[in-house]
Image: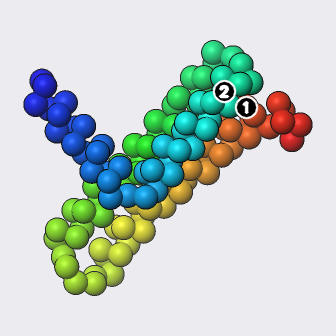
Amino acid sequence: MLVKFRAALAGVLYCLRTQINMVIHLTAMVAVIGAGWYFQVQPWEWVALTITITLVLAAEAFNTAVEVTVNLYTGKYHPLARIAKDVAAGAVLITALGAVAVAYFIFGPRLGL
């Protein structure tokens, strides 16, 4: 069990070392958690924020896995490789836009928006 946990942690650390977007998402996560504490959000809002943050970080990790796998398979340009990478990046975009919507619904009224 410990070996599997270490492998999973190595994957997360790989994302942090190689993917600037993962660092950006983690920075946003810290800001959202700070805003949640500052505005004293309700427990159900914490649940929504936690799920949203988790989805964005997981999507970014899956995107990295797809990119690395495609790069392993082919070092040359291939239209299907480009599609695979674009679709994976699109999944990150979808979750990030959803996170912005959740943040707007939770923090917008508190900010007068």
Report which quarter residue 43 is drawn in: top right
Extreme-top residue of the structure? 43
Q: Which quadrant of the figure contains the N terminus?
A: top left
Local crowd at mark 2 within 10 Å, few (<14), some, or many (≥20)? Answer: some
Extreme-bottom residue of the structure? 77
Residue drawn at the location 60% of the way across and 23% of the way down: 46
**Colour scheme:** rainbow
Residue drawn at the location 75% of the way across and 34% of the way down: 107
Residue drawn at the location 10% of the way across and 31% of the way down: 3
Residue 95 appears in view = no
Picture layout, residue 72 above or below residue 17: below
Lateral position of residue 49 relative to residue 71, left or right: right
Picture layout, residue 83 above or below residue 61: below
> Residue 74: x percent and y percent?
18, 76
> Residue 7: x percent and y percent?
17, 39
Local crowd at mark 1 within 10 Å, few (<14), some, or many (≥20)? Answer: some
Q: For numbered disc 2, what is the local secondary structure?
A: helix
Residue 46 appears in view = yes
Lateral position of residue 60 relative to residue 64, left or right: right
Report which quarter residue 67 is drawn in: bottom left
Circles 2 and 1: CB distance less than 8 Å? yes
Residue type at mark 2? Gly
Residue drawn at the location 86% of the way across and 41% of the way down: 113
Q: For numbered disc 1, what is the local secondary structure?
A: helix
> Residue 18: x percent and y percent?
32, 58
Question: Which residue is labeled 1 in the image?
Answer: 106
| Along the viewing direction, whichever of 56 and 12 lies nearer the viewer | 12
Question: Which residue is labeled 2 in the image?
Answer: 36
Disc 2/disc 1 C-alpha distance (Å): 9 Å
